[in-house]
Amino acid sequence: MTTPWITIDLAKITHNARTIVHLCRQYGMTVTGVTKGTCGLPEVARAMLRGGVVSIGESRLKNIYRLTASGVHTTYMLLRTPPLSEVQDIVTTVDISLNAEVAVIAALSEAASRYSRVHGIIVMVDLGDLREGVWPDDLLPFVRQILPLPGIRIVGLGTNLSCYGGVIPSVDNMQQLVERVDQIERTFGLHLQYVSGGNSSALPLIAAGKMPLRVNHMRIGEAILLGRETLQRTPWPATFQDAFLLHAEVIEHKVKPSVPLGATGQDAFGKTPVFVDHGTRDRVIVNIGREDVDPAGLTPLDTRLSILGASSDHLLLDVTAAAGSIRLGDCLTFAMNYSALLAAMTSPYVDKRYVSCPAGSMASIPD
Ligand SMILES: *Cc1c(COP(=O)(O)O)cnc(C)c1O
């Protein structure tokens, strides 16, 4: 087998979803399962729905098309702010979108009216992470402008932290969100169905019992897919970290020096590498590279192996500590972080295979 592949354990994804849904339910929150790390793979969405998520969140319309075409019938939430150029497709495909621009909401309103639909709007509030969202002070005039628009309904307020600025969800910033919700409900006589507090980075605050009660919804991807919270990336209790594993074949195995010979310039990606002399080492090449995966996000399951580097099609490892047990043609297995998962799931050169391991068989993943 020369094609690298990812194994996807759907039972583990369902288990992880169930763990997160159970935690959130204890504190009065529902969970939207976020599939964008897998390019909206229908089997992954189904596994999440079996685990109790109430809807599916996606950043890309193409992924939502893939899901609906495969017969995954659920409520869809578009996470990335809609482009003006796509409003028509969005109102006919997606139930709810996350928004922060009046002009976009006006265009959604116009398109929805044309199709006699009502499109749900969650207004995003920027609580300091500086990615998407309306600045809190601008929120009242923002809502005042969109409230009269036909074809849309303001179904909630949301926020997203830990994505650009790395801002940690706290009692303080979550309380700010709740205060804005109260203010809008009072001012306009609305009831907001969703107070959407965040992503996998909010789990520590939730588990500590400190999430304000009025926050009633979470959008969770990574904690379900990879079993980690996203502040420190520590494994989340009672979840699997190995629902996705990457496998690639050893195509060269040789003993070579650890420092290149001759004068050196830039490598294949324009970097100037630096080498430390560890003498001659047992090295292997496996058939995967930057065209398939983010090599920095790979961890070999065999802790005796270490990754030396990668070019487009080759991943190099030092296997000296395990030299006797690795042969040409063997397959090496790697855990992936979110960045590696995203790339490998997107690469057409990486096969995707479903496996189901007996419940409780948890491979230990080195940190
Ligand atoms: C990706 C995304 C999420 C999910 O984030 P995870 O860290 O994978 O849980 C939630 N909300 C928005 C707006 C997103 O873009």
Image (spheres, rainbow, N blue to C red):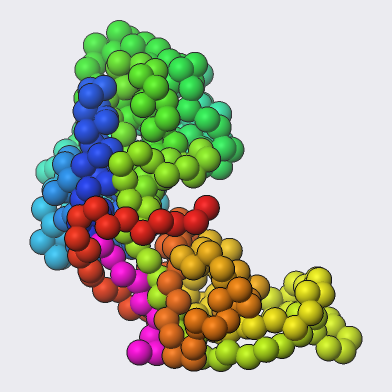
Taking the magenta stretch, the answer to whether it contains residue 227 is no
Specify whether 239 is left or right of 153. Answer: right
Instruction: Looking at the picture, tell me which residue is in the foreground, 297 or 216.
Output: 297
Picture layout, residue 214 above or below residue 299: above
Instruction: Looking at the picture, tell me which residue is in the foreground, 227 or 194.
Output: 227
Picture layout, residue 205 above or below residue 250: above
Q: Residue 42: where, in percent of width, then height?
A: 20, 62
Q: Residue 340: where, in percent of width, then height?
A: 48, 63
Q: Measuring 43% from the left and 15% from the top, which residue is drawn there?
A: 175
Label count reads 0
Q: Residue 246: where, in percent of width, then height?
A: 40, 70
Q: Measuring 63% from the left and 77% from the top, which residue is drawn there?
A: 320
Give the image quarter of residue 295: bottom right
Picture layout, residue 133 above or below residue 179: below
Residue at far front of view: 324
Specify whether 238 is left or right of 162. Answer: left
Q: Can I make out residue 8 in this image?
A: yes
Q: Which residues fall within the magenta stretch?
A: 1-9
Q: Can I make out residue 347 in this image?
A: no
Taking the magenta stretch, the answer to whether it contains residue 7 is yes
Q: Measuring 39% from the left and 32% from the top, which residue is drawn there?
A: 203
Q: Residue 281: where, in percent of width, then height?
A: 70, 81
Specify whether 213 is left or right of 321. Answer: left
Q: Measuring 42% from the left and 44% from the top, which residue is drawn there?
A: 235
Q: Quadrant of the N terminus?
A: bottom left
Give the image quarter of residue 311: bottom right
